[in-house]
Amino acid sequence: MPRFDAIELLRTTYLRGPSIWTYRPVLEVWLALGELERYPSHTIPGFNERLTAWLPDLVEHHCGVGERGGFIERLHEGTWMGHVLEHVIIELLNLAGLPVGFGQTRETSTSGTYRMVFRCPEEAVARVALAQGHALIMAAINDDAFDLKSAVQAIKTSIDERYLGPSTACIVDAAQERRVPQVRLNDGNLVQLGYGAAQRRIWTAETDETSAIAEGIAQDKDLTKRLLAAAGVPVPEGVIVANADEAWEAAQDIGLPVTVKPSDGNHARGVTLELYKEKNIRAAFALAEKEGSEVIVERFIEGTEHRLLVVGGKVVAACRGEQVNVTGDGVRTLSELVDELNRDPRRGVEEECPLELLDLQLPNIQLELARQEVTADTVVPAGRKVLLQRNGNMAIDCTDELHPDVAYHATLAAKVVGLDIAGMDMILKDIARPMHEQGGAILEVNAGPGLLMHLKPSSGAPRPVGQAIVEHLFPGSGEPGSRAGRIPLVGIAGARGGAFIARLVGWLLQLSGKLTGIACSEGMYIAGRRTQKIDTANWAGAHRLLTNRLAQAAVIQTTARSILGEGLAYDRCQVGIVTDMDGWEQLADHDVRESAQMARVLRTQIDVVLEGGVGVLNADIAQVAELAPLCDGEVLLYALAADNPLVASHRATGDGRAVFVRAGQVWLATGAQERPLGTLAALQPAGGAAPDTAALLAAIAGAWAMGIAPDLIGAGVKTFDYHI
């Protein structure tokens, strides 16, 4: 067999929203097989065996066969390398911990050139996966060595760098389950949930309701304790000290043992517990001083550390910490025992690991070891336990054991500080008993608490904390038919009169009482004022509009080219309008070669209409009207003549709505019922005539589909000045 040249990657395009392929973001890759076009998978000796040896889980890919082993069957029957590359990339993403199931490969009108897509929520990750998949398939074709572990690690690294952290991701996933739209606002964890005026924002476990004042209070541990104590919440007695001498004096006044910690630290850094000796207290002061602006010495509370998550005034999850110990065997050193402990798969540096790796050189561990008079090189006697960490190891879910009195104090503390989402650090002997009965106390109130401990406890049930936060932000979002986070949104696709339609529908929405934003080819408009003069009938323009908190409603014009090259900027819309199938002649670079192919492109606008929404279609163009069965909501037709056969059959269903012209007058019909809106001569914008009658009818139909009263539509059209 010859040695094959690499499959040529002609171009890659990240489609960030609904497209001709799917509703979700995908990477579209144009590739040329070259001489490999003559060699399907079963014709290259050893190829299938090498591929499945590297990626044995390809057997789980159903492919077009529809059952387990379907793709393997296709491999042995013979399939082309573009299709194989699709599945290789998907499997690499799966191995890297990013579950992906969607991909497609289709030949273009040019023989040997294919369009291959696969789903991936982050563009940078998708491109790394493409590069690694491309390298792997060429190694399998040419019988070269390939380092699979390094390939998977490269993708994992990209995921760690680009993907949302676990706390943010669980909230976003919960929002997605409830069909609340999401918009990532930066490369970090700032995410917008919802559109326009209906949006809420999160940053990890902080929301736009998280007060900066409350966060500042939570960071000041001494102030927090004083406020909690004033409200009757049990807290440990403590004082701020300026130096090690004062720390030792305070410890004696409070009574040994004590805890020494920074006044404004977090993640248990700089905290040392149960200190009896002067030398240890002085060392603990030095450690705490590095981690905060001031140092607190407080009474040590006997018990186990617990973390309670309070969301919107309710405790939604609780977990218990566990001390980290190693038990000696009389043979191995402490360092060797810790190395074994670090091999626990739950420990790691990645964000998804609920437990951190143990480092004996960390100052807090060094202090703990000094207190026990052992070092890393000590051979620990058989049976002796060495304590490594007392706190920061929240891993055992205990939500179901929570006593109402403990929950009450936790929610009270969150209210006192002023946090809508708070992580409550409590010392308790038993979470199932009242606080005062066991001498429990609240140690800290944390803003932006980590959620991983509740999502991946080492024992006990994971808790749906993401759902709780989404329900807090969008009450009732879990109910059937909820449109939480959504504003009325009209999408317009086609080449005829799009800007006029968008602006007139936006004008009518504005008159109906909604502050309306418009993104169209003539610019960006908010509340009737043009804020940008550039073409915004594209993904970027729509994105800017949907992130604008002023917009109570949105009208967005798009084009076939934008759908093909970017995808829609919104996931769903209340009303989708398709005017025509024109413009295919300018889309040869997207392999659109004839008018019939436009239906696959512009159906995207109808595919995203919400159930309970309305698809508005031009019945004078059969190819447009044929999109009707694809609409999840109602269909409303418009036509230049009342006797249009498609309009007649649509009305014959009994409740089909239509807008049409008869005897020079515009009519609105629902089944057999009709009402006149006005004459065409009268229904003209104040600033001059509409571009054409079809565009006027489309705008009227779109406004009617949005529930605007006919009388307001008639009056509004006459007051619209298209030339402003």
Image (tube, rainbow, N blue to C red):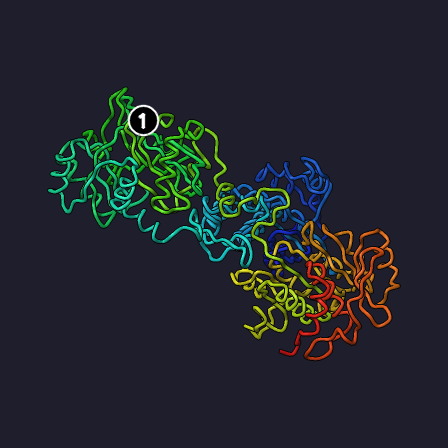
Q: Above or below — where is 102 with respect to 642?
A: above
Give how far across and how far down residue 118 sits, in percent. 62, 50
Q: Above or below — where is 212 with respect to 96?
A: below
Left or right for 511, reference 236: right
Left or right for 415, reference 594: left
Left or right for 152, reference 23: left
Label 1 packing within 10 angstroms: few (<14), some (14-19), many (20+): some
Residue 280 falls in which quadrant of the image? top left
Instruction: Residue at the far front: name it.
Output: 711
Per the image, the residue denoted by label 1 is 429
Q: Above or below — where is 505 with respect to 341?
A: below
Give how far across and how far down residue 169 sits, in percent. 49, 46
Front residue of 723 and 128: 723
Residue 410 falls in which quadrant of the image? top left
In the rendered image, is residue 113 in sight?
Answer: no
Give how far across and how far down residue 100 sits, in percent. 59, 44
Left or right for 512, reference 335: right
Q: Above or below — where is 98 with respect to 337?
A: below
Give how far across and how far down residue 408 sits, in percent. 38, 34
Name which residue type carries label 1. Answer: Lys
Judging from the image, what secondary structure is the residue with disc 1 in?
A: loop
Front residue of 651 and 85: 651
